[in-house]
Image: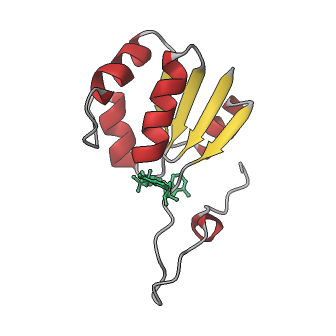
Amino acid sequence: MKVTIIGAGYVGLVTGACLAEVGNDVMCLDLDAGKIALLQAGGMPIFEPGLQALVQGNVDAGRLQFTTSVEAAVAFGRIQMIAVATPPDDTGAACHWTARWPATPGF
Ligand SMILES: NC(=O)c1ccc[n+]([C@@H]2O[C@H](COP(=O)([O-])OP(=O)(O)OC[C@H]3O[C@@H](n4cnc5c(N)ncnc54)[C@H](O)[C@@H]3O)[C@@H](O)[C@H]2O)c1
């Protein structure tokens, strides 16, 4: 199954790596170009024991890839999983993820 993970943070990156490990083809999208560049270079932006090896093994196997392209990510997965951050607004109230969604023709 081809799966797109939108947001490559603690939730999205771990989920994407685990889905790749069980045989799915996974593309992780993040708007943070620095984070994606680091992942593409074999680095790890978060601390999660065992995750670097899991990610690298699946990248090497061709089942896990990273992108900043909304268009490529949306076109990739039959399943699209959203794992973007939902920070509080100025009042401290929870912010719905759609408030941060990029307005793009690709999406
Ligand atoms: N981390 C946890 O233990 C945990 C537990 C339960 C629920 N959650 C929820 O899961 C969601 C993700 O949490 P997290 O800890 O992975 O956050 P995170 O901040 O580690 O990762 C979110 C990622 O989404 C990216 N992002 C933000 N807006 C984006 C957009 N519009 N398009 C693409 N990428 C975008 C950010 O750059 C970041 O890399 C949040 O809603 C959080 O409340 C997290």
Looking at this rendering, what residue extends furthest in the bottom direction? 91
Q: Say whether residue 15 is visible.
A: yes
Which image quadrant: the N terminus? top right
Q: Quadrant of residue 97?
A: bottom right
Q: Quadrant of residue 54?
A: top left
In percent of width and height, residue 105 lies at 73, 54
The structure residue drawn at horizontal position 42% and vertical position 18%, both measured from the top left corner, is: 59
The structure residue drawn at horizontal position 28% and vertical position 42%, both measured from the top left corner, is: 45
Q: Say whether residue 71 is visible.
A: no
Left or right of 11: which side holds 78? right
In percent of width and height, residue 31 lies at 48, 52
In percent of width and height, residue 49 lies at 25, 32
Q: Nearer the viewer, residue 42 or 105?
A: 42
Left or right of 96: which side holds 57? left
Q: Quadrant of residue 58?
A: top left
The structure residue drawn at horizontal position 52% and vertical position 55%, both measured from the top left corner, is: 84
In percent of width and height, residue 36 lies at 39, 40
The structure residue drawn at horizontal position 29% and vertical position 20%, both measured from the top left corner, is: 53
Q: Nearer the viewer, residue 53 or 30?
A: 53
Q: Is residue 82 above or below residue 104?
A: above
Looking at this rendering, what residue extends furthest in the top direction? 61
